[in-house]
Image (cartoon, grey):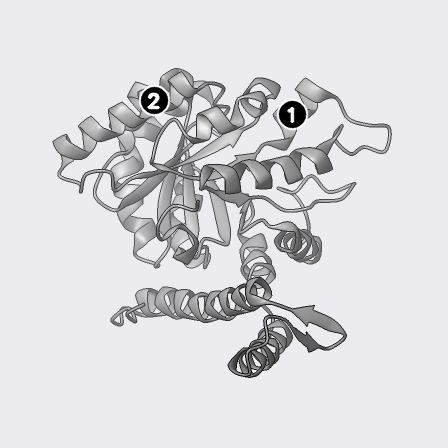
Amino acid sequence: MIHRGALQKIRRSWLLVPASNDELVQTAHLSGADVVVLDLAELVPEADKPSARETIEASIQKVTSGGSEVFVQVDPELIYADLRASVWPGLAGIVISKIESPQQMEEAHQLLEQLEEDRGLLPKSLEIVAALETAQGNHQGYEISVASQRVWGLTLGRADLVMDLRPEPSGEIHMMQYLMQRLITLSNAAGAVPLGAWWRDPDRGLLATAENTYKAGFRGRSIGFKGSMCINAEQVGPLNQAFTPTDFEISAAGSLLGAYREGASQGMAAVKWDERLIDRGTAAQAQSLIELGANCTLRDESKEAALEGRPVPAP
């Protein structure tokens, strides 16, 4: 069962920004990203982490001024220091990098609970995305996902998985297609949202061109992903576009829904439409796609309004 409200949150593009890079942090609110991830775990040199933590509170306020949600990526080995630095009003949640056990998830949950109380945030308002970036993390993916009700999403990491699982001669990571499809299955079973894209060699995702980013995102949406991480602001627009239903898709869904409703009104359980038989489940998928398109439009309008200082449209 999907967590209540999980799929209504439009989080197509997740822009990773090193928390230590002030120039990138100061411009992240202009990126158009649905989510900006201030990274403390992967992109910040060890020597710079203490000073980067000191800037997180101000960075959250700066990024949210552009209408993006803010997550902070934390290191499970430094979870206490990272969360103490990150939990402030305006934060939407955290990404736990390289998480490998349910115990790590439980520890993060408890720390967030205490910090929400200490910092005046609503109880259980902060969400978690678990990054299953190692073989061990993948192996325990379901157990990790259900260890806390805060878990909103799951994602894979490519570079670390390559080290654990080896690349194939083609340059593709060993069994990546299986791992992506498994992540989607795990996410749906655990009530979480799968994040990722279907990259193809020679791309490594984070450095892909805008065109290849769009293609990877579109392929990813086709198999069940709902959004993807990126590291380049130029990838944000292509991801937003790729994870938004096209006008053609919405039009086709409307026609399908109309045909089903007409047949259902005549007592038919299944209706022939465009060389297909459609039933209640198919109609429900069409309705969800139409609603997704409308919610994507509202999300884009809300970011534009925030940037221009106008009232944000109600959802």
Residue on which the image places disc 1:
161
Three-letter amino acid code of the residue under disc 1:
Leu
> Residue 145 appears at what percent x and percent y?
45, 31
Three-letter amino acid code of the residue under disc 2:
Glu
Location of residue 24 (image quadrant): top left
Mark 2 to mark 1 CA distance (whole Å): 23 Å
Query: Dividing the image into 4 quarters, which one contains the C terminus?
Result: bottom left
Look at 38% across and 26% down and name the residue there. Answer: 147
> Residue 68 appears at what percent x and percent y?
37, 54
Q: Which of the two labelled residues, at mark 2 and mark 1, occupies the earlier sequence position? A: 2
Look at 81% across and 32% down and name the residue there. Answer: 171
Q: Is residue 199 above or below residue 247?
A: above
Q: Is residue 110 left or right of residue 141?
A: left
Q: Nearer the viewer, residue 74 or 273?
A: 273
Location of residue 19 (image quadrant): top left
Numbered disc 2: secondary structure? helix
Q: Is residue 234 above or below residue 163?
A: below
Q: Which mark is residue 119?
A: none
> Residue 302 appears at what percent x and percent y?
35, 67
Residue on which the image places disc 2:
106
Q: Nearer the viewer, residue 139 or 13?
A: 139
Q: Is residue 54 above or below residue 260?
A: above
Query: Dividing the image into 4 quarters, which one contains the N terminus?
Result: top left
